[in-house]
Image (tube, rainbow, N blue to C red):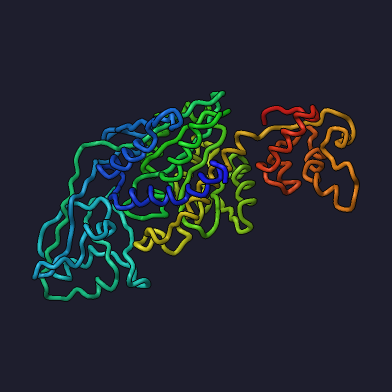
Amino acid sequence: MSDESLENEQIGERLYQDAARLFPICRSLTGNGVRETLRIIQAALAPSGAQGPKASLEIHEVASGTSALDWTVPEEWNIRDAFIADPDGTRIVDFSANNLHVLGYSTPVDGYFELDELDPHLYSIAERPDVIPYVTSYYSKRWGFCVSDNVRKSLRPGVKYHVVIDSEFKNGSLSYGELIIPGQVADEVFLSTYICHPSMANNNEVSGPVVLTEVARWLSLKPRRFTYRIVFIPETIGAIVYLSRHLETLKKNVRAGFNVSCVGDDRGYSMVASPYENTLADKVALNVGSFLSPYFKKYSFLERGSDERQYCSPGVELPVVTLCRSKFNEYPEYHTSLDDMNLISPAGFKGGFNFVKRCLEVMECNQRIRVTCFGEPQLGKRGLYPSLSTKGSASVVKSMMDLIAYADGRNDLIKISEIIKVPVWELVPIIEKLRAANLIESESA
């Protein structure tokens, strides 16, 4: 097995182990969990010898109260502990056992409550009695606990429960990470993922950062035509903050963008298209996804829900689509305690990484090609066609002949790939053979 093949076999297992490091961290829009996550990513991208990554993640802090487009950076929120205990001191609900138990951005509380006082602050899913839901209240001050419906029903009237949420709000900052990997040209490919949720595995704050960290390592070790801008941000407010700081540059330089979300499971592949489904990113993602799986699904922008909302909003209008395995809000474990390390897998991560990697490879190699001679070229005299004509011999070079048939200078590789139903990555070695024989010329698409 070649070194490259061995690396490809091992990559899923390595990414799964990386995910296990990120999974326990309690993250939110702001705070120490976000910083810890960014430091882990930064360390993973630190230069490590002649063959190591040459990328460097910069961590930025934006002060609470900073205006960003129509929004304002909220107060920083951190949490140390939280629980609901019975009169004997036994913790019925314990933040240290599962950090989904606390309503995101809960205000601090320490008191004794009977059930009728406590129940309005509890969130559960009656139809799924064993599941802890994920609920937040980022921009309205309240406190609460997310519990399984079975636990909720076990609470009894007349009992005084000790309720503690040891949280803190302060004028701190919002943290995000940015990585720019220069290419031969200033034209950029934009990659984004988010880091703002507590312990859910396929949901983007684990799977997306793990996959994009590996993508950054891979990109930093290969020749590149495009410049790559990669950001690790809190969802929504992080994207808005980043746009408020870089919109002019992004609108000038970005040729295609990919928001990466929910890429750790192994159920399928999907994308969320841009509003009019007419960008280069749309073409690339649809082409790659369709060849990766016959069950690939394209969702309309009307089914948006991640940061494609911000990147494609009126006035911003960046050419961005979202890449997923199972799309957010479409798999049953989404935003619940069932989105754990059992939902993701090494095979899922390997596929998620390859989805993003293939899209970037197509971006890098896409070109318009034109045959340099009139009429069908004689491939035999160039050693490109079997010298003995038998039934089926033409099938050996069918992809080459089909590619030549549409190499009229009007089609890029993505279009030819769609017409002749051969993946772009399988056309590239054919093009190299034709170029070596001086049979084609090309220009950037």
Q: Residue at x 32, y 54 (%)?
A: 199
Q: Residue at x 32, y 31 (%)?
A: 60
Q: In terms of depth relative to the viewer, which is nearer, 202 or 377? A: 377
Residue 263 visible here: no
Q: In terms of depth relative to the viewer, which is nearer, 180 or 172? A: 180
Q: Quadrant of residue 2?
A: top right
- Residue 109 in percent (x, y) is at 14, 55
Quadrant containing the C terminus in the rendered view? top right
Q: Is residue 241 left or right of residue 352?
A: left
Q: Is residue 248 above or below residue 45?
A: above
Q: Is residue 134 left or right of residue 367?
A: left
Q: Residue at x 50, y 32 (%)?
A: 221
- Residue 227 in percent (x, y) is at 52, 28
- Residue 202 in percent (x, y) is at 42, 54
- Residue 342 in percent (x, y) is at 40, 61
Q: Quadrant of residue 66?
A: top left
Q: Is residue 333 above or below residue 206?
A: below
Q: In terms of depth relative to the viewer, which is nearer, 396 or 404? A: 396
Q: Residue at x 60, y 36 (%)?
A: 363
